[in-house]
Image (spheres, coloured by chain):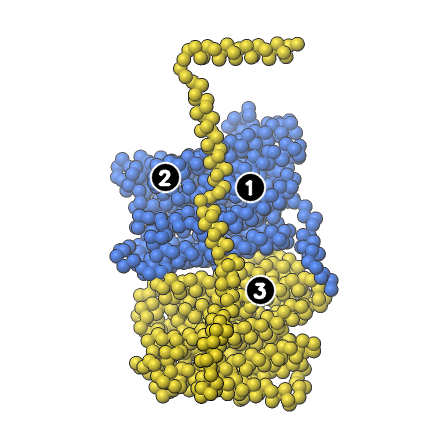
Chain colours: A yellow, B blue
Amino acid sequence: MTAIWLIPLFPLASATLLLLSAGRLPRQVAAVLGAGSVGLAAVCVALTARAFLADGEVREFTLWTWMAVGEFTPRIAFYIDGLTVVMMSVITGVGFLIHLYSVEFMWEDESICRYFAYMNLFVGAMLLLVMADNLLLLYLGWEGVGVCSYLLVGFWYRDPANGSAARKAFVVTRIGDTAMALGLFLLFTELGTLDIQPLLAAADSQWQVGDTLPILATALLLGGAVGKSAQLPLHTWLPDAMAGPTPVSALIHAATMVTAGVYLIARTFGLFQLAPPTQEAVAWIGLSTLLLAAFAALAQHDIKRILAYSTISQIGYMFLALGVGAYASGIFHLVTHAFFKALLFLAAGAVIHCLHHEHNIFRMGGLRTRLPVVFWSFLIGSAALAALPFTSGFYSKDAILLSAWELPGIGHWLWAGGLLGALLTGIYSFRLVFVVFFGEAHTQPDHQPGWKMSLPLAVLCVLSLVGGLLVLPLGNVFPPSGHHAAGHTIEYISIGTPLLGLLLAYLLFLGRQLPVDRLVDSAPGRNLRNFWLSGWRIDQLYDALWVRPFTSLSRWWRNEPVDRIYNAVVAFTQWAHHKLAALQTGELRWYATTMVFGLMLLLAIMLRNAT
Amino acid sequence: MSMAGLILLLLLGGLLAWQAERIHPNLPRWTALVTVTAALLYLLAAAPTEPGATMAGPHYSGSWLLHLKLAWMPRFGIAFELAMDGLSLLLLVLTLLLGLIAIAASWSEIDFKPGLFQANVVWTLAGVCGVFLAVDLFLFFLFWEVMLIPMYLLIAIWGHENKTYAAMKFFIFTQASGLLMLLAIVVLAWQGLALTGQLSFSYFDLLGLSFDPRLGWWTMLGFFLAFTVKLPAFPFHTWLPDAHTQAPTAGSVLLAGILLKTGAYGLLRLCIPLFPDASQQFAPVAMGLGVAGIIYGAILAFAQSDFKRLVAYSSVSHMGFVLLGLYAWNALALQGAVMQMVAHGVSTAALFMLAGALQHRLHTRDMGRMGGLWHQAPRMGACAMFFALASLGLPGLGNFVAEFLVLLGLFSVQPWLAAAASLGLVTAAVYSLWMMQQAFQGAPDTRRNMADFDGREMLAMAAMMFALLWLGLHPQPVLDLAQPVLDSLRAAAPFDNPVAALDTAAAAVPGRGL
């Protein structure tokens, strides 16, 4: 029992120490603290998970009452069920591997102390997010991970482009967060609590399926989820967020934080079941995001941006799963995605690290023999991402597609869209493999990754391969989904599609049997490529819709328009002063005349009043 | 404890600091520091936290801790009457703490007439303490003026390049609105005379009287204007950016940290409880001004290139939340407003101290000429980041508790206004992070050589960081202190909220009851 509150405490305490040291700790100490604290948290999680798996009992733990005003009494308290255990394991397990990798990756950086401080703070906040027993504490973790993401994306602060990417990430997600805060206000006003389990029970008893209030509340929560998980229409921050160090992208922008939206919806699925329109919207958002991002990924040439778009696309699958009610499949895909996407990012980081910060895939090439460890890691990661048979990604994605197929009504459409996405995933992930690791070499690696980088890659390789065999303890969390009556044809199609994608990628980018260059060089091809390269020009759209109006308005108002009113009063006073001062000429004649006229006027008034 | 003694201690300490200059130029700041520390320790040690048994008056008998009434001008019903409850205690602690910060912030900044400078700082504190304690309205007005004049002198004598303009603007705005308040106080006392047959300026005698609605409306407006100019609320805020920008660091810290709070305190203590009916009618307008201030302040904050001016506009934006919370007038929103008074006091004082330190080192406030300062001064950068995050409402820090409670309370009465006000959460992120980018991030200027925060400055910063973390993670002691006061204020002046506004809002959404 005592291990529970230790879990977030280790990384938070280490972050505090590192921050207070103000960078004066030797890098060895910083590295031990940074990676060690997450390792200790992982050990505590393992102990908690073992105890949970043994008896299956939900554990609750209250530290203190955060605040109490009338009925509003949120606590700093944890709620540990199967879903929490799964999330904690991913955060601390994959998190530890990424911290270990970071030790080597960031060794030369002068700010390694600050780096580990932010990373530990992130892990602590993320743990609070998934362990919270009420939505307010969840919101604390939610904003906390947002801030850490901001700090880490802008970690190399000297380049203003990094700062701008960091601000974009924070502000765009804050728009979603604000919607989520409104959702919290609505839920508390209507149901009188923010504690998740009582809240779900109260919603169930007070609201009918299809009422306006649950629809409104879930739509607002969905706003938060869409922002954090980089789904349409708030996905634009994630590709830019690749400005941060690569392990940051692996931890925050692939394995953990960006899946917080998925967690939120899964955690409050009882509300979403009361709101079928929102639930359906989740599915459509997932589908459109996964297709849009997959097309965008096809046209990128920055290795990290390809992976970023693929993350957006894969989270789209998770949203699709949540939308069709296959919550466990969504979480399953979250887990496998954490393995293979962290693997891909770390492998990409190794490539970048060994190639003097080269990001452009067309200036790589031929690395298969020069960086064998990285090559195999990347190959396994890509196979899992493309969901080739018997990799972890295959099991989770297959489950999602089957659940979509079985949904009556729109299910077949969702399935077909998901399948198209799977084809595109096969193409863009093996395009990456073929361009980077095969063909001619354009840049020479100057060293090989050491063990601190290779070991996490190896472990993640294993997990990406066999992670599909994991059985997650989600049985008591979600309602059982009636399993799978779809025919074998559907199965074969979903097995075959990624292979077709692989084949197409081979023909296009390695065998060169298909004339991809001629296609891209033609005018429509070039336009389409630029269109996808820019992410469907959505950034430009938002720029015109929001950013420029805001900046021009603020420039226009800059000099305080309200002051014009007060300046007018001042001007009038001064004007009146000059006019009245002009009466004081100092001439006796003028004074006498005005006095006489004044007296006559007064007399006239008095006489008039007397009569 | 003796409330009059506290004020007297500060007045005398200021006098002493002034004269200490004759002995040594460094002595005034030590005198001021010792005086304010002594006052704070005295307050913390001697203030009771349980209600006193001797409280007179039909109202609030439950929540007052101390009461003092000395005859002063009995012919006019004016007495030297002070009283303290949890709310005043809270604000007194804030005042004296930020007084220490102000003295620490200007420790080595002032060379010209340091004695008079420290005297004005301490006298401002005395005036503010008086405002938070006075329950005779005439005395209240007197203290209102007492805190104005030393602050005027601080800006006019020790201010920056455009100090005369800023000081005059500050004085005229406050004085003109103060005059309206004086007028309102006199009218109120006359009304009291007509209703009860005795002339009294005592808060306890005037509270709960049912005034003529028309006259009550206009009297309420007099108070409202005086307090919202001070708060400041849109569109009466334009004195604030000038005053803040031109004031010396200690002046900005005091102005933002505590003087603005006297406006909020006045609304909470006087304006709404004395005129509940008129206030309730007026609440939509007041809340509209609150939302307008939140958004307008944020947009203008983003437009500024002057560090201090940016922080000043952020104050306009944050004080909009206070106005919203006060006029929502329910338990959650009022607690939020009180919490915002405290948390914003601390976070803005810290940001102004940072701005002052930057100006002292770089001789500019223009963020266009900063950039990359994190490299030269990582401690300043980390502090700035912390308080910028506090200012944008990061959960875990006091400002979040404040703004969340305000919006949560407001949502139950005015959901659409709450939605509009929550835009402030986004815009606060925009200007706070933009400030960090311009000043501390970006490429450093390698020719620049700037000293980082020293021990004294870090101590002040650490105290404020600790305060905000404490308010953010365990705000209960503060909430408990304010709770009985807010309960009895609401009991004395109930707003009847028959409209469950949310239901009307939900009805406006098509598809209800599908």
Residue A408 screen position, x and y as percent: 70, 78
**In contact (CB < 8 Å): disc 2 and disc 1:** no
Residue B374 screen position, x and y as percent: 34, 59
**How many angstroms separate mark 1 from mark 3 (CA)?**
36 Å
**Which numbered disc flags the more N-terminal residue, 2 or 1?**
2
Q: Residue B134 or A251: which is nearer the viewer?
A: A251
Residue A223 badge: 3
Specify whether B168 is left or right of A395.
left
Q: Which residue is mark 2?
A: B162
User: Tag 2's secondary structure?
Assistant: loop
Residue B267 badge: 1
Residue A396 badge: none
Same subunit: marks 1 and 3 = no
Specify whether B182 is left or right of A359.
right
Can I make out residue B182 in this image? yes
Q: Looking at the image, is B61 positioned above or below residue A543?
A: above
Q: Chain of mark 3?
A: A
- How crowded pointer 1 is (Cα within 10 Å; few <14, some 14-19, many 20+) is rated as many
Discs 1/3, front: 3
User: Tag 3's secondary structure?
Assistant: helix
User: Tag 1's secondary structure?
Assistant: helix
Same subunit: marks 2 and 3 = no
Residue in the picture at 47% in, 69% down: A534
Type of amino acid at the residue the image marks with label 2: Asn
Q: Chain of mark 1?
A: B
